[in-house]
Amino acid sequence: MPRLTHLDDSGAARMVDVGRKAETVRTARASGRIEMSAEALTAICAGSGPKGDALGTARIAGILAAKKTSELIPLCHPLSLDAVTVDFSFLGDAIVAVATVSLTGRTGVEMEALTAVSVALLTIYDMAKALDKTITIGGITLIEKRGGASDEATG
């Protein structure tokens, strides 16, 4: 069974020591979706919801969230990110968010990508909830990570 890197030999939580790791270019992409009524989706797409431009606001919220991940997830390292993008597409009754995060560093950016997607979707929810009380968020997943020892595409 693989050893959990965030636990020390006694089982106590710890931040992983990445000081001896080589700096490499690392990227991660995560996605998620928010489903809502056709009326709410039309308003969000048109930027005419009660709180204004939900997608623009959600994009900024996702970028900010990626930058603040270490303040939200206790054992994440504070990172100096090189780039964060949050993009949206439309699929049926849903908006799909995809966040891509990159840096040159000693640890990966999976948590930053997942946090960016989560907060972007929560922001859309907040800005559309007056239009639809049945909105659902789901499918948040890591699509791909690159760089480091476990360089792999995940989906």
Image (spheres, rainbow, N blue to C red):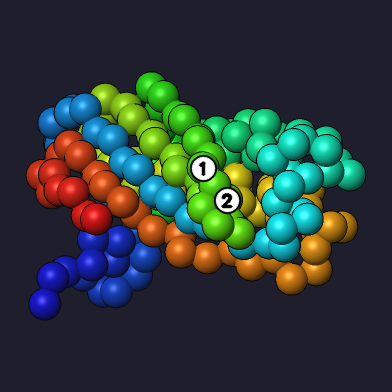
For marks 1 and 2, the one nearer the N-term is: 1
The kind of residue on which mark 2 rests is Ile
The image quarter in which residue 103 lies: top left
The kind of residue on which mark 1 rests is Ser
Label 1: how many residues lie within 10 Å, few (<14), some (14-19) or many (20+)?
A: few
Instruction: Check the image and name the residue furthest to the bottom.
Output: 1
The image quarter in which residue 154 lies: bottom left
Q: Tell me if residue 84 comes above or below residue 62 in the rendering.
A: above
Nearer-the-camera pick, 60 or 69: 60
Label 2: how many residues lie within 10 Å, few (<14), some (14-19) or many (20+)?
A: many
Secondary element at tag 1: strand
Q: Is residue 15 visible?
A: no
CA gap between label 1 and label 2 equals: 6 Å
Instruction: Check the image and name the residue furthest to the top.
Output: 82
User: How many labels sit on residues?
Assistant: 2
**Label 1: which residue?**
89
Quarter of the image with the C terminus in it? bottom left
Where residue 26 appears, as percent x and y from the top left, is: 24, 33
**Label 2: which residue?**
95
**Residue at 53%, 40% in the rendered image:** 88
Q: Tell me if residue 98 comes above or below residue 131 in the rendering.
A: above
**Residue at 17%, 28% in the rendered image:** 24
**Residue at 39%, 58% in the rendered image:** 141
- The answer to whether the residue labelled 1 contacts the one labelled 2, judged by CB atoms less than 8 Å apart, is yes
Quarter of the image with the N terminus in it? bottom left
Q: Is residue 37 visible?
A: yes
Image side of residue 61 versus residue 109, left or right: right
Nearer-the-camera pick, 2 or 50: 50
